[in-house]
Amino acid sequence: MTSWCPYCVKAREYLRSLDVNLIEYNIERDKSKREEMLVKSGGSRGVPLIDVEGIIIRGITPMPLRQPSREEEVYKFTEFY
């Protein structure tokens, strides 16, 4: 995790509290993931950037990230920080 991004910490804690499948990428260490993030964000370098099965969420916004109500729905969360 980057030491300079308190919002990434908040996003991670919130997503973990939802008990969702979370895959995290450190864009400072992984150039290919940095490029992927830039494509998904339309060139924005702001973090965190959260990809919920193709739906891009910039920053930490708890309401759209709530766990689905039906048990059969499983979302894959990807966080770029």
Image (cartoon, grey):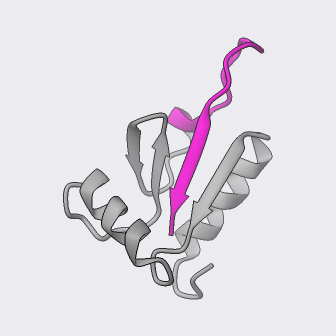
Q: Residue furthest left?
A: 43
The stretch drawn in magenta includes residue 35? no
- Is residue 11 visible to the viewer in this orientation of the structure? no
Q: Is residue 60 left or right of residue 31?
A: right
Q: Is residue 19 left or right of residue 58?
A: right
Classify 57 as above or below 1.
above
Q: Residue at x 66, y 21 (%)?
A: 68
Q: Residue furthest bottom?
A: 3
| Horizontal and vertical percent position of residue 31 | 39, 77
| Horizontal and vertical percent position of residue 27 | 46, 75
Q: Identify the image quadrant of residue 72.
A: top right
Magenta region, residue range? 63-81
- Is residue 7 visible to the viewer in this orientation of the structure? yes
Q: Nearer the viewer, residue 9 or 2?
A: 2
Q: Nearer the viewer, residue 69 or 41?
A: 41
Quadrant (top left, top right, bottom left, bottom right) of the N terminus: bottom right
| Horizontal and vertical percent position of residue 74 | 67, 25
Q: Is residue 34 left or right of residue 29?
A: left
Q: Residue at x 73, y 39 (%)?
A: 20
Q: Nearer the viewer, residue 20 or 13?
A: 20
Q: Is residue 39 left or right of residue 75?
A: left
| Horizontal and vertical percent position of residue 35 | 31, 68
Marks counted in the figure total 0
Q: Nearer the viewer, residue 75 or 66?
A: 75
Q: Identify the image quadrant of residue 37.
A: bottom left
